[in-house]
Image (cartoon, rainbow, N blue to C red):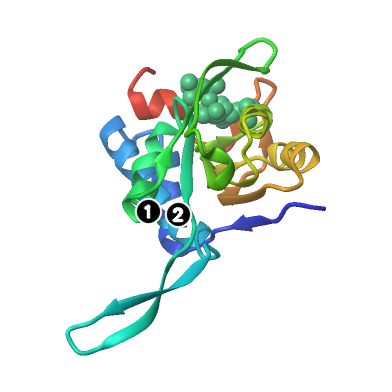
Amino acid sequence: MQSKVHIMDHPLITHKITMLRDENTKTKDFRQLVYEIALLMGYEATKDLALRDVEITTPMMKTTQKALDTKVAIVPILRAGLGMIDGVLALIPSAKSGHIGLYRDHETLQPVEYYCKLPPDIAERDVIVVDPMLATGGSAAAAMSFIKKRGGKNFKLMCIIAAPEGIRAMQEKHPDVDIYCGTVDEKLNENGYILPGLGDAGDRIFGTL
Ligand code: PRP
Ligand code: URA
């Protein structure tokens, strides 16, 4: 099995990512752009949600129509993933949220877990893990493993900028998880930052630069 990589090169997404990358984009606009990109990407990434027949009555007649047949969980990887959650929730207000707290150790680049709280029925939900950056892939891969350990089965990963190294790592460790990204950048630098990238996503969202 090989996971699919969906690159969402919609002009609006591409334009907004260019604005995100710009070092002159300030915290308030950065946060708003992350929200808007997550919403646009969420629209694309939910194209395959299952529908079921429902009976309703319009002002004119009874009719059988389609409604969502999928329970969704949105799981941001803290901190930066928090910036994407409202955009996806705007599309699927009934979704539940989980949270996974991970940070990359600056020396080893290995993810360190500090928090994990998921909806108890995670096994029955389509899980969308959100994080703006897929760099080495360590954080996303660890997040998937935590969710799998707690029963999660159906996953997607949504990230705004991915490095080829991160995509390869995810495909190796979690070939069942499709990846939805706004763009794939050139490579990582020696500190594990994406080039050209946008810098530190968490710091830019929360103004902790
Ligand atoms: C960033 C980003 C990802 C991770 C990606 O988080 O939001 O979670 O790095 O890097 P990786 O693919 O090499 O694991 P960071 O560790 O900086 O934490 P923060 O969101 O709290 O700033
Ligand atoms: N995390 C970030 O926030 N930015 C990168 O470029 C890599 C990891």
Q: Which mark is residue 92?
A: 1
Q: Can you give x and y, in whole percent of width and height, for residue 202 in the image?
A: 44, 26
Which residue is pictured at 70% across the width and 22% down the height? 190
Question: What is the C-alpha distance between the residues marked 1 and 2?
Answer: 9 Å
The part of the image, by quadrant, that contains residue 63 is bottom left
Asked if ligand 1 lies within 8 A of label 1, the reply is: no
**Picture coordinates of residue 36 (x, y %)?**
35, 50
Q: Is residue 18 left or right of residue 163?
A: left
Mark 1 near mark 2, Cβ–Cβ under 8 Å? yes
Relative side of 47 to 38, left or right? right
Q: What residue is drawn where x is 70% and y is 42%?
A: 167
Q: Amino acid at mark 2?
A: Gly
Q: What secondary structure is found at the residue carrying circle 2?
A: helix
- Element type at marker 1? loop
Where is 59 relative to 98, above or below?
below
- Ligand 1, by image quadrant, is top right
Can you tell me whether the CB of the residue at mark 2 lies under 8 Å from the nearest atom of ligand 1? Answer: no
From the top left corner, tell me how far across and down residue 73 is, in percent. 47, 43
- Which residue is at the front of the view, 54 or 115? 54
- Residue 149 sits above or below residue 52 on the image: above
Question: Could you say which is closer to the camera, residue 81 or residue 155?
Answer: 155
Q: What is the quadrant of residue 193 in the picture? A: top right
Residue tagged 2:
42
Task: Residue at 52%, 62% (x, y): give it.
Answer: 49
User: Residue 33 placed where, x, y %?
Assistant: 34, 45
